[in-house]
Image (cartoon, rainbow, N blue to C red):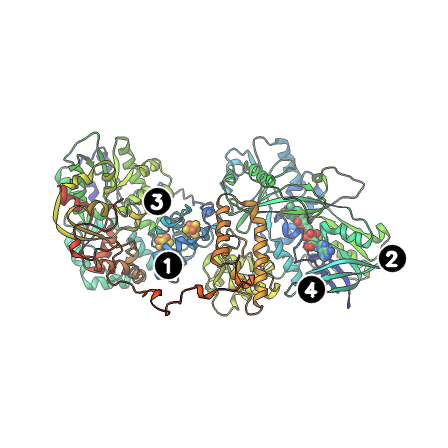
Amino acid sequence: MSKRSRVLVIGGGSTGCGIARDLAMRGVDVTLVEKGNLTHGTTGRMHGLLHSGGRYAVSDQASAEECIQENRVLRRIASHCVEMTGGLFVQRPEDADEYFEQKLDGCRECGIPAEVLSAAEAREIEPYLAEDIERAIRVPDGAIDPFRLCVANAADAVEHGARVETHSEVTDVLVEDGEVVGVEVEHAAGSGKYVHGHPGETEKLYADYVVNATGAWAGQIGEMAGVEVAVRPSKGVMTIMNVRQVDTVINRCRPKGDADIVVPHETTCILGTTDEEVEDPEDYPEEGWEVDLMIDTLSELVPILDEARTIRSFWGVRPLYEPPEVGSEDPTDITRDFFLLDHDERDGLPGMASIVGGKLTTYRMMAEQISDHVCEKLGVDAECHTAEEPLPGSEDFSVLREWMDEFGLRSPIGKRSAQRLGSRTDEVLGEWDGPNPTVCECEAVTRAEINDAIDDAGSELNAVRLRTRASMGNCQGAFCCHRMANELSPEYDESVARKALDDLYQERWKGERHALWGEQLSQAMLKHLLHATTMNRDGDPAKTDDRVDFTAFDAGPDGGAAAGDGQQSEDAVADGGITDETNAGEGAADADS
Amino acid sequence: MSDAESPATTEPTDPTREHETDFDPVSVFDGDETMDLRPGADNCYKCSVCDTACPVAEVDDDFPGPKFQGPEQWRLKRKDGGEIDDSIMSCSNCMRCDDACPSGVPLSQMHNTARGEYVDEQMDKLSREYVRNRILANYGTLARLGSKVPRLTNLVMGNSLVQKINEKVLGIPSERDFPAFASQTFREWWHERGGANVENEDKRIAYFHGCYSNYNTPEVAKALVRVFESFGYEVVVPRQRCSGTPMFANGMLDDAERAAGVNVGEFSDLLEAGYDVVASCTSCSMSLRQEYPELFELSGIEEVAANTYEALEYLRIHEDVRGALDDASVDDQALAYHAPCHARNQGLDRQAVELFRDLDGVLIEDVGDSCSGISGTYGWKEEKYETSMKIGEEMFEHMRDATGEVGMTECPTCSMQMEHGTGYDIKHPLQLLEEALC
Ligand SMILES: Cc1cc2nc3c(=O)[nH]c(=O)nc-3n(C[C@H](O)[C@H](O)[C@H](O)COP(=O)(O)OP(=O)(O)OC[C@H]3O[C@@H](n4cnc5c(N)ncnc54)[C@H](O)[C@@H]3O)c2cc1C
Ligand code: SF4
Ligand code: SF4
């Protein structure tokens, strides 16, 4: 079996999805393949900062300028993925004045709006900042939801005729006569709009041009094609707090260092991060000291973090790249810029290019450049419109308030839904028929929204989670995993729902186990007991094949005297009852103190 | 202003201050720093125990319950405001959720703060509901006016036509009888009596009588004075305003803060002179102890909170009340005792039963741990009346099943509800103590 398209993009992260959308909008026939779900890679494990460029204003001004430019673009085209929180670079007494000045000048040189705030002004904006801070610089940093961003890009690409295939891993790059002509993929189990193959099946996909957008995995694809792509994966930890202690991005104003940023993300705050080179982007140690470092260091800026509850931690790997001749020792010295490697020019292998490095904030710009390059190779003459056309969900939408009333949702629930759904709110909530209870209470996700995500993502609850945030709040799915699984019925059968539930539960546990102290430990224990004992999920006869001894149960309410009469006494007094006048004066039946 | 009649014996209140704007002091607390209670949500592990304790959720399926109202709603909040769900107005502020939570989530503080924000920012200030709530919340002011001409007021308020008008115009249910005003307020009596009968440098209390026992049930306040004096206490009755309980429940936090300013000012001066603060109403003591420091920043507020007690509680700590009752006896009587929710929150829900069950002549039964349903001003709202009565049903039933035909409780509004639901007379524990000891 084989298929053909003009361009084949490998990798369903922000870069790959951005390229697919760009090319599709230019009328190019494009297929995107991704081995897991969309955002399976780094895009799903990043910090969520929409850079203003401030972080690079001293060390890497070219990147800084790209950031502020794309920051403005994304606010326009991806408004439902972006929350413009603003950001502060905060100087502590031990941080150098000189660097503060450099930062300020750098911002101004790069066209990043920057304003100096006194300590008092900064603390008025963020009351939980440390009392002894010196001052701060305010910049237009924001928060961005990478999941929604990718899903919106993929949806729009499909809208423009692209084909998106998830759960399809590239296992080989097909080279014929010294030219890349396509790839071989192996399909894995999955469901939803973007799954077309059958599990275990392999397939050859031919294309006039192949784009390797696999980020930290780019070296592996390169290897399959016989070229070297020297990506240097570098891991970073991020720790998620239960609530938003700050509503503004808080950066430490000092030269590069670990644990220097807090990003408010949806209902939480995310602390980050570290930068440490690893061998394998999929197998690296996740260590407790990394989490401790986040909390210890960042509580110098925001002291309340020290006491606050963390709900989980996760790690991501940066797809850092530098031309081999640079040879930086320390990964933090590697540029955050991106590189387009034309394997024809570089290695004499036509038909393929790799794109490596970069940031999520500049994904659209990277996609534009590589799409220009592909179009040039293919002789397509079409312009890029991705900077002007809003993504689905980010078209103009007016007053949310009225909608909330209309949908009969409680204010904060309606508001959160509308923030996630953007201009699709009306479609998703308004067209829902029947009762619409809240399925995930922590994140305020209703049945209508879950079902919309199931329509899109299929039975995989982790994909539903990424679209809706259901199970991402403080109980980490204790009260909603099973409710989400329940929504799969009747479309999917019981075994599918069970497997989806187990997968989601395990995925949640993966990050939760890095936060097992204090309140989150109680939470995890309650979750375990609810699932293991109340729901008997650890010994469920339906799963264990054990026969149930039904005779061991009592006969039920109609089964005879043993079941009790269930009648309430007519003259019950809650005190234990003095029903007899002769007892009067003796006081109540229960013992004193 | 009747408060201006406080006698000079209520040392150390400066008599010249009596002539100040007691009625509506200038608002000096307008700094309006809205509190960020999101970190409070950290303590919640979502067990739902609070929901099972909430009397409103039990009878009203549309009420989302304290878990949503408190930690969940707060966690979803943004600093730049954001909508508070209007269901916050259905919470009666009984604070049972506070007591139920095993994990120290500041539920009632969250409800009170959110309610304040809702009323400030989302409620139409010209609406009938707002006007009615403002009137109910400021019962003390209303009472001050009404008690000037108690007989006339009682006559007018008891008139069924007026009650109908109240229902139509203000949304106050005509089923409820307005509490009658006493012909002489407690403060008037105190003044006439010439203040305290006992002087004692070592044992002295400052009495927080609140509105109700001043205007409506002065017999309770008088019982407190007599009982404490019988134990040798010197009592002072300083200038004071409403404790704020009805204001919290109606989201009128500015009104409450003004009143708290007066109260904290007066009572913290007295603390320095060796007085402890004693209240005869469990909601008043709750307010001074818990809500004041949770909601306001006023100098001296922590000290006042730490040194406030409910009357029976105070005596049981410092005196051998049980010993005193050993030799005492009263006329035979059977009592159906209801513990107010706010007493429960302070751990006082068993004190009356524990104290009186061995008293000669008394049969006292606890009618259980349900909520009376009135929760201050809650049951005074037309749209809440039904809910209020549904909540109260369990208590009414248990009262009817109990031997006694006289009710007993520490809370004035619970006593209104008990009377309303059963037609029984209701006593305050201090009145029984007075019978036994004085
Ligand atoms: C800790 C950390 C924090 C970060 N914070 C920020 C930030 O705050 N702001 C910002 O702008 N940027 C940030 N970044 C950078 C940003 O996350 C990445 O640059 C961006 O997400 C990279 O996207 P990508 O699409 O290139 O790579 P990826 O998202 O990794 O996408 C590559 C995809 O290819 C797929 N793939 C791999 N092999 C195969 C195969 N054989 N067949 C099919 N598919 C395959 C993978 O599954 C993956 O989904 C951060 C990065 C890290 C590590
Ligand atoms: S009782 Fe406390 S911990 Fe449990 S759900 Fe309610 S607020 Fe949360
Ligand atoms: S204060 Fe009472 S009515 Fe309000 S939420 Fe708590 S338990 Fe329910």
Determine crowd level at label 1: few under 14, some 14-19, many 20+ residues with C-alpha closer than 10 A.
some
Q: Residue furthest left?
A: B331
Q: Amino acid at mark 4?
A: Pro
Q: CA distance from mark 2 to mark 4?
A: 31 Å
Q: Which residue is mark 3?
A: B291
Q: Are marks 3 and 1 on the same chain?
A: yes
**Is the residue at mark 3 in contact range of ligand 3, meaning its CB lies under 8 Å from it?**
no
Q: Which residue is mark 1?
A: B57
Q: Amino acid at mark 3?
A: Glu
Q: Nearer the viewer, mark 2 or mark 3?
A: 2
Q: CA distance from mark 2 to mark 1?
A: 73 Å
Quarter of the image where one finds residue B390: bottom left
Q: Which residue is mark 4?
A: A199
Labels 3 and 1 touching (C-beta < 8 A):
no
First reached walking from the N terminus: tag 2 or tag 4: 2
Mark 2 belongs to chain: A
**Is the residue at mark 1 in contact range of ligand 3, meaning its CB lies under 8 Å from it?**
yes
Determine crowd level at label 4: few under 14, some 14-19, many 20+ residues with C-alpha closer than 10 A.
some
Q: Are marks 2 and 1 on the same chain?
A: no
Determine crowd level at label 3: few under 14, some 14-19, many 20+ residues with C-alpha closer than 10 A.
many
Query: Is label 1 in a helix, a strand or a loop?
Result: helix
Query: Is label 4 in a helix, a strand or a loop?
Result: loop
Q: CA distance from mark 2 to mark 3?
A: 79 Å
Q: Amino acid at mark 2?
A: Gly
Q: Nearer the viewer, mark 2 or mark 4?
A: 4
Q: Nearer the viewer, mark 3 or mark 1?
A: 1
**Residue B185 shows up from this direction:** no
Give the left or right position of residue A144, taking residue A578 as reference: right
Q: Amino acid at mark 1?
A: Ala
* Mark carried by residue A178: 2
